[in-house]
Image: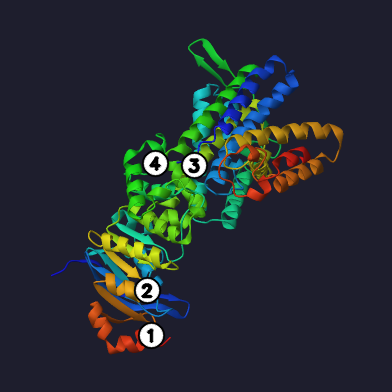
Amino acid sequence: MQTPKPVLPLLFALICVGIALFPLVGDSFYIRLVAKIVVLAILAMSLDLLVGYTGLISLGHAAFSGTAGYVAAALINKAGVTALLPLLGASLAASGAAALVVGWISVRTSGIYFIMITLALGQMLFFFFHDVAFWGGADGVNLTTKPALAVGEATLLDLSVRMEFYYTALACLVAVYLLLSMILNAPFGQVLRGIRINEGRTRALGHDVQRYKLACFVIAGLIAGLAGFLEVVRGGFISPAHVNWHESAMALIVVILGGMGTLVGPVVGAFALVLLEDYVADLTDHWKLVIGLFVIAVVLFLPDGLVGPLKSGKCRFPRLRQRPKESVRDA
Amino acid sequence: MPETILETRSLSRSFGGLRAVAGVSLAFETGVVHAVLGPNGAGKTTLINLLSGDLPPSEGTILFKGRDITRLAVHERVALGFGRSYQKTNIFPELTCLDNCWLGAQARLPGWLHLMRPARRYPAVRDRAERALVLCGLDHRADAVAGTLSHGEMRQLEIGMMLATEPELLLLDEPLAGMGVEESRRVIDLLKRLRADHTLILIEHDMDAVFSIAGRITVMVNGAELETGTPDRIRASAAVREAYLGEEHAA
C-alpha cells in the first residue's frame, strides 16, 4: 500500500497548531488574512484530489465553490434563512449537483479536452450568475446577515463573530484533510491512483474508471462547495468573480505551488501565495509580476512544489530533487 | 462434446480502409490452450483487443458461454472472468509489485464505493494479490517498485496482475515477448500450470513454446482465419506452411 510519509501529516498538524495559536499573537488584520488562507486551502485541497491524485486537471473548479456561495447568499438575503445547517446543506447540494452534471459530461474526455471542457462548463455557470438578474448582477451582493447555529434560544455558533468563524474554518480544514486521507487510503483511493498512473490498465484490471472519475469529481465539487460557503460567509459578499475561471486558475496555482498529490501542499501553497501577495502588493505596483516570477521559479526548481523536498519515497524527478536546499533559498 | 467458452461470429474490425480482422468465426473450448499464430500484421493483437473489449468490433458478435457480450465494456468482461496481458508491458511503474497486483485483486471486491476502511485492511484482497505474485514467481520482489524490474520480471508482473483478478479466461498477447531463455522457460512452466484450471487464448511467436503448450492452433493471415486444428494438423498443413511457417523457416 501507499508508502507512509509521516513527514507530511506531521507538517499538516504543525500548521494547524500554528493556525490555532496564531490569534494569541496576531493582530486582527492577519487573523482575517489567515482565515482567508484557510478557506482557500480547503478549495485547493479539493482540487488536489482531482489534479494531484487522479490526474484530472480541472480549470472550472471555482464554479462549484461559487455555486455554493451564491445559493447561500440567495437563501440568506431572499429567503431570510440564517440557520447554519439548512444553509450549508442547500449550498452543498447545489455544488454537488453542479459537479454531477459538469462531471458527467467531462469525465468522458481526458487530457487537454478535460481542461477545456471544465473551463467551458465553468464559464457557463459564470455567465449564469453574471447575467441572471436574480443573483445580483455583475457587482455581486452583500450578505444581509451571517448564519448561526442555534438550538432553541441558545446560539451555539455565530459565524458573524470573527473568532468563531476562524475556528470553524480551521475545523473544516482538519475535517476535509481527514476525510480525504481516509478516502485516499481506502480501495477507492487506490483506484484513483491507478487512474492517474495508467488509466487504460486500471480499466483492464476490471475497474469502471468513468464511474470512479465521476465520483471523485463530485466529492471534489462538494468540498469546493464547503469552501465556497465559508468564503461567502467570511467576506459577507459574493460576485461573479468568485465563479470565474481566474478563481479556478488561482486554486490550480495554489495546488501546483504547494505540491500536487500531497493534501498538505495546497495548504502550504495557499499560505505562500496569499502572504506573498500581501507583502509584495505593499512594495510595488507590479506585484503580479513578482508573483508570476515566484511561481515560475518554484515550478522550475521545485517541480514537486514547496513541500516536494519533504516528500519521502518515490519521486519522479530524482535529478532535480538533488538540490532542493539551494532552490528554497532562491525561491 | 467439449464446451465452448468463447465464440466469435463474423467478427471484423476495420481501421480506415484496412480490415485488420476480417470476418473471423472461431470457437474457443473450455480448458483448452488455443494459440493464434500468424505473420506480423495478421490481426492477432486486434483480435485479442476485440475479445477483451479494448476495441469495439466493426461487425460481428462475440458470445461468452452463449451470452452476447459484443457491447460489454472491458471492466464488465473482467467481471465475467476475462483477464488479459499486454504485448507491450503495461504496468504501474511507480507502484510496488504487490500494489500492481493489488489493483487487480481489488476488482473482485463486491461493489465499488469503498471509501472508509483502509485498503490494507482487506485481507481477502491482500491474499489474492499475494497469490498472484506467487503464481507469477515474483513473491520475493513484492516490495520492489515495478519500474525498476528487469524486462523479464516486468513480463511476469504483467501476467501476475492479470491473475490477481482471478480470471477464468486468459487472453495472453505475446507473454514471452523479449524474454531470455531462462525467463521464457519459467513463463512457459507457469502457462502449463495455468492451463489446468484456466482457458488460455494465446498469441505467441515462439513456435516451440506454442507447439508445446497449445491444444488447438488457429493460423491467421491478413485478418482472416486460414486454418484451425490440433498442433499436428497445423504442422502438417500445406497451406499453413506456405503462408507462414515456410517463410519463417526460410528466414
Q: Position of residue A228 (x, y in %)?
A: 60, 33
- Residue wearing tag 2: B206
Q: Residue at x 77, y 31 (%)?
A: A278
- Quarter of the image where one finds residue B9: bottom left
The alpha-carbon separation of the residues under discs 3 and 2 comes to 49 Å
Would you say the residues marked 3 and 1 are in contact, meaning their CB atoms lie under 8 Å apart? no
* Vertical order, A205 against A187 (above or below): below
- Residue wearing tag 3: A218
Q: Nearer the viewer, residue A43 or A123?
A: A43
Residue type at tag 4: Leu
Q: Residue at x 67, y 30 (%)?
A: A37
Q: Which mark is residue A266?
A: none
The alpha-carbon separation of the residues under discs 1 and 4 comes to 54 Å
Are the residues under badges 3 and 4 in a single subunit? no
Residue type at tag 2: Asp
- SS state under label 3: helix
- Residue wearing tag 1: B249
2 or 4: mark nearer the eye: 2
The alpha-carbon separation of the residues under discs 3 and 1 comes to 58 Å
Q: Residues within 10 Å of mark 3 (few under 14, many from 20)?
A: many
N-terminal of the two: label 1 or label 4? 4
1 or 4: mark nearer the eye: 1
Residue type at tag 1: His
- SS state under label 1: helix
The alpha-carbon separation of the residues under discs 1 and 2 comes to 12 Å
N-terminal of the two: label 2 or label 4? 4
Q: Chain of mark 2?
A: B
Q: Residues within 10 Å of mark 4 (few under 14, many from 20)?
A: some
Q: Nearer the viewer, residue A178 or B103?
A: B103
Identity of the residue furthest to the left in this view: B1
Side (left or right) of A24 relative to B25: right
